[in-house]
Image (tube, grey):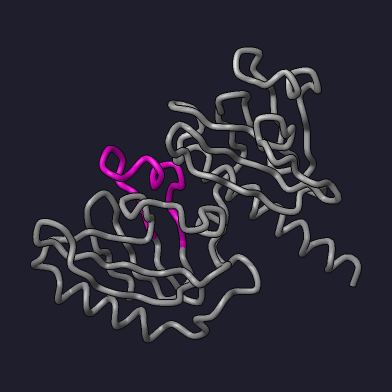
């Protein structure tokens, strides 16, 4: 391999051990630009396909194995097709070439079932974004929520800002902004989450213009990747 295929908003480079996805500034989706260049090992893929797309185009698409990518694990099926970072829309005339690359990638696939750990690197850190009720920041070691007096509930604002070290976090629940609602919630070890994220100090809530997918999803994925890495490190140290 080693060839490059350029499509709408992205270039895919087919290397010996994986696929390198590079977004094109000004043309790629905001989510793809926020994720930046990503290397996807073939061992992280469950399937490869070429499908028809709108306006007579074709789409080359890869499907990561369950549990192989922190971004898709955080998204839990909520991403709109247009935001899927694993689809490359191409002119219809390139279908034969797309089929060729698809065949070569399929031949490189091995295990297609769920992955035991992330095989694709998480988004870079540090990261931060503004939600409706506060700002979320992640430096690679801890998540910090700083509440806004204009948006935070009395319960959150009275409780004060929060800092959660990675070692205290079990997971992240991300709910895409839809109908002016959405949230990012940390699952804290040994604590029961409150039913209402507006009052849960381990959550930030989204609103129109606050907590957009291209900001909040990479944040959630970065935290997930760090949590898993910390757990693996802890098991290795205990073993």
Quarter where residue 128 is shown: top right
Residue 59 horizontal side relative to residue 39, left or right? left
Q: Kindly tell me whether residue 123 is visible in this rendering.
A: yes
* Vertical side of 123 occupied by 142: above or below: above
* Vertical side of 118 occupied by 186: above or below: above
Quarter where residue 126 is shown: top right
**Magenta stretch: includes residue 55:** no
Q: Residue at x 60, y 65 (%)?
A: 118
Q: Residue at x 81, y 23 (%)?
A: 159
Quadrant location of the C terminus in the rendered image = bottom right
Residue lying at the far right of the rendered structure? 238
Nearest the eye: 235 or 133: 133
Magenta span covers which residues? 21-39
Residue 95 horizontal side relative to residue 44, left or right? left
Q: Residue at x 86, y 50 (%)?
A: 190
* Vertical side of 88 occupied by 100: above or below: below
Q: Kindly tell me whether residue 137 is visible in this rendering.
A: no
Q: Position of residue 63 (x, y in %)?
A: 41, 69
Quadrant location of the N terminus in the rendered image = bottom left
Q: Position of residue 22 (x, y in %)?
A: 36, 53
Residue lying at the far top of the rendered structure? 150
Nearest the eye: 44 or 170: 170
Residue 154 horizontal side relative to residue 50, left or right? right
* Vertical side of 108 occupied by 4: above or below: above
Q: Residue at x 36, y 82 (%)?
A: 106
Quarter where residue 17 is shown: bottom left
């Amino acid at each position: 391999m080693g060839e490059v295929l350029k499509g709408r908003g992205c270039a895919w480079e087919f290397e010996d051990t994986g696929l390198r996805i590079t977004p094109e500034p000004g043309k790629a989706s905001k989510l793809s630009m926020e994720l930046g260049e990503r290397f996807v090992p073939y061992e992280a893929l469950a399937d490869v396909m070429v499908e028809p797309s709108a306006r007579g185009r074709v789409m080359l698409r890869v499907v990561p194995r369950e549990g192989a990518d922190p971004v898709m694990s955080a998204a839990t099926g909520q991403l709109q097709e247009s935001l899927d970072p694993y689809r490359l829309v191409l002119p219809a005339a390139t279908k034969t070439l797309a089929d060729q690359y698809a065949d070569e990638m399929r031949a490189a696939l091995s295990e297609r079932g769920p992955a035991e750990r992330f095989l694709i690197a998480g988004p870079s850190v540090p990261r931060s974004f503004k939600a409706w009720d506060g700002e979320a920041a992640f430096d690679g070691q801890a998540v910090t929520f700083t509440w806004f007096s204009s948006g935070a509930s009395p319960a959150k604002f009275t409780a004060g800002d929060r800092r959660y070290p990675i070692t205290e976090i079990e997971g992240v629940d991300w709910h895409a902004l839809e109908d002016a609602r959405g949230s990012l919630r940390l699952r804290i070890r040994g604590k029961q989450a409150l039913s209402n994220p507006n009052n849960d100090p381990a959550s930030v809530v989204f609103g129109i213009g606050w907590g957009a997918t291209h900001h909040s999803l990479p944040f959630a994925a970065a935290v997930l990747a760090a949590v898993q890495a910390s757990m693996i490190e802890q098991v290795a140290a205990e073993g």
